[in-house]
């Protein structure tokens, strides 16, 4: 096992990793920007090293400074968390060149799965069902339109190197296609510096269902059940739950076996997520593989009893999986709500500021993952997520009631948040009845 690990991230995920390391007896090194000098992860770690100004490009995305901090501190491993450099193959490669373990898959695998078009082709070859679409990357709008015409509308236009909902546009009719393609490609160039696009047949009113997998260095792969991530605003997830209420045990096993097959097809290692679209008929299609820990991993931890971050670190240290598929059982129901510093009444504009009053709910089956404390000033330079509120109970109805109670107890004053919107969703009839899909927020709230 590692003696010292550096966390190449900030906020609640950095705090989450520090806690896991403490329980494993591993010393931690935090890196921080000048804006995060007083942040919780900076205070909790055994060591903390400033790596630059507030701008992420000069700090949390600056590979040389992070690796210099790792080498100077004597860290044997780097955990990238999610976001920032977590799916950057160059960073994983540089870690390896410096003799530092990267807590995640290899650089080559990150690159292959990060290219959505290549990942799709790999899954097709492995017999994993994929959404009908372009077999090769496309670059020109007119060339892409010919492919779209052959696939049939509606068509989803996607960035090959995309993520987080960026570089995605829907063309419902042929006359919309060229403009949508050009807009998506421009957004892709701005966000990722790459113009590679691909097309997929648009699945009407699907659910977004992802399966968590763990894989060690010795070819052992297990799946830990699914998460329903259908409640989204502009492809950004708002809340997640496990298990998915629309999936039978038979379908769960089929999708789980497919997720394992997908991981095995690429020789996957560490924690990852296989994301599917599930249509109303119960057919499912591979969408993408995320090669990192997910924001929503706590709901899987609540229903399985496993600590995914600890498992990640053990795998990176060369330990075999300590659990078999037969030993994994989903118990009860878990829901996670993301509480963000944003104003829903002003197009979800980010709302940085100082936390004047903070009260976090507690009790049996209630978990809060956060880096907030009273008096903390939220920087304007980073993601707006403040708290992940997670609940667990015996079934979905009980979990919904528990989340309503927990949201009602949560107090965050000093900044605007989406807390009231989350509370409203938890009481909305269609959501409570499980009648949801990826268009839920648009249909019910116009978002």
Image: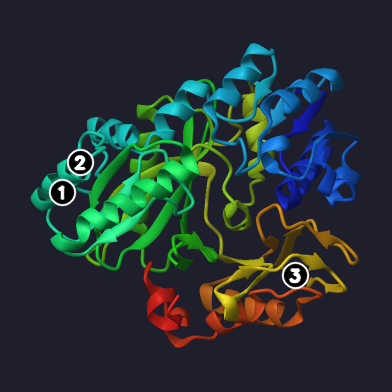
Using the image, determine if residue 251 lies above or below residue 391. above
Q: How far apart are the alpha carbons under marks 3 and 1?
A: 54 Å
Q: Is residue 63 left or right of residue 187?
A: right
* Most foreground residue, 387 or 253: 387
Write the residue at 76% across / 20% down. 76
Neighbour class for label 2 at 10 Å: few (<14), some, many (≥20)? Answer: many
- Residue ID for mark 3: 364
Mark 3 to mark 2: distance in Å? 49 Å
* Residue assigned mark 1: 145
Would residue 118 be found to the left or right of residue 340 on screen?
left
* Secondary structure category for the residue under label 2: loop
Image: 336 above or below 293 = below
The residue carrying pointer 3 sits among few (fewer than 14), some (14 to 19) or many (20 or more) residues within 10 Å by Cα, namely few
Identify which residue, 19 or 206, lies in the foreground: 206
- As drawn, the label of residue 378 is none
Task: Measure how far apart labels 2 and 1 are at the Cα level.
Answer: 11 Å
Which-is-in-front pick, marks 3 and 1?
A: 1
Residue at coordinates 55% horizontally, 23% vertically from top-left? 90
- Which residue, given by chain and number where applicable, does mark 2 sit on? 134
Q: Nearer the viewer, mark 3 or mark 2?
A: 2
Instruction: Say whether residue 384 is left or right of residue 194.
Output: right
Q: Nearer the viewer, residue 197 or 243?
A: 197
Contact between marks 3 and 2 (CB within 8 A): the answer is no
Residue 410 in view? yes
**Corner quadrant of residue 77:** top right
**Whole-percent x and y of residue 404?**
64, 81
């Amino acid at each position: 096992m590692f003696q010292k690990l550096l966390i190449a991230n900030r906020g609640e995920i950095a705090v989450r990793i520090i806690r896991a390391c403490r329980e494993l007896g591993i010393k931690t090194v935090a890196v921080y920007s000048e804006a995060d000098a007083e942040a919780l992860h900076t205070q909790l770690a055994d060591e903390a090293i400033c790596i630059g100004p507030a701008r992420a490009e000069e700090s949390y995305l600056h590979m040389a400074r992070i690796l210099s901090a790792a080498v100077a501190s004597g860290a044997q491993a780097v955990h990238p968390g999610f976001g920032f450099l977590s799916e950057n193959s160059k960073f994983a490669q540089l870690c390896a060149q410096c003799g530092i373990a990267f807590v995640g898959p290899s650089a080559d695998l990150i690159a292959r799965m990060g290219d959505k078009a290549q990942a799709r082709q790999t899954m097709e070859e492995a017999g994993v069902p994929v959404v009908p679409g372009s077999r090769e990357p496309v670059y020109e709008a007119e060339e892409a339109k010919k492919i779209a015409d052959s696939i049939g509308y509606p068509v989803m236009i996607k960035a090959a190197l995309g993520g987080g909902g960026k570089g995605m546009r829907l063309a419902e009719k042929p006359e919309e296609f060229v403009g949508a393609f050009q807009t998506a490609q421009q957004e892709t160039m701005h966000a990722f510096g790459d113009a590679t696009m691909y097309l997929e047949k648009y699945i009407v009113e699907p659910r977004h269902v992802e399966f968590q997998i763990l894989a060690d260095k010795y070819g052992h792969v297990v799946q830990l059940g699914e998460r329903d991530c259908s409640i989204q605003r502009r492809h950004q997830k708002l809340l997640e739950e496990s298990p998915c209420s629309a999936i039978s045990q038979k379908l769960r096993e089929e999708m789980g076996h497919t997720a394992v097959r997908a991981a095995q097809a690429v020789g996957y290692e560490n924690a990852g997520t296989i994301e599917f679209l599930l249509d109303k008929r119960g057919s499912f299609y591979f969408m993408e593989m995320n090669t990192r820990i997910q924001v929503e991993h706590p709901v899987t931890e609540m229903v399985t009893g496993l600590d995914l971050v600890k498992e990640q670190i053990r795998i990176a240290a060369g330990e075999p999986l300590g659990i078999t598929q037969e030993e994994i059982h989903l118990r009860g129901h878990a829901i996670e709500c993301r509480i963000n510093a944003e104003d829903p009444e002003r197009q979800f504009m980010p709302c940085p500021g100082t936390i004047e009053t903070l009260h976090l709910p507690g009790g049996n089956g209630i978990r809060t993952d956060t880096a907030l404390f009273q008096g903390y000033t939220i920087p304007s330079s980073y993601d707006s997520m403040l708290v992940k509120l997670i609940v667990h109970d015996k079934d979905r109805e009980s979990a919904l009631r528990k989340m309503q109670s927990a949201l009602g107890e949560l107090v965050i004053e000093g900044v605007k948040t989406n807390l009231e919107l989350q509370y409203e969703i938890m009481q909305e009839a269609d959501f409570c009845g499980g009648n949801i899909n990826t268009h839920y927020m648009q249909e019910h709230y116009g978002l």
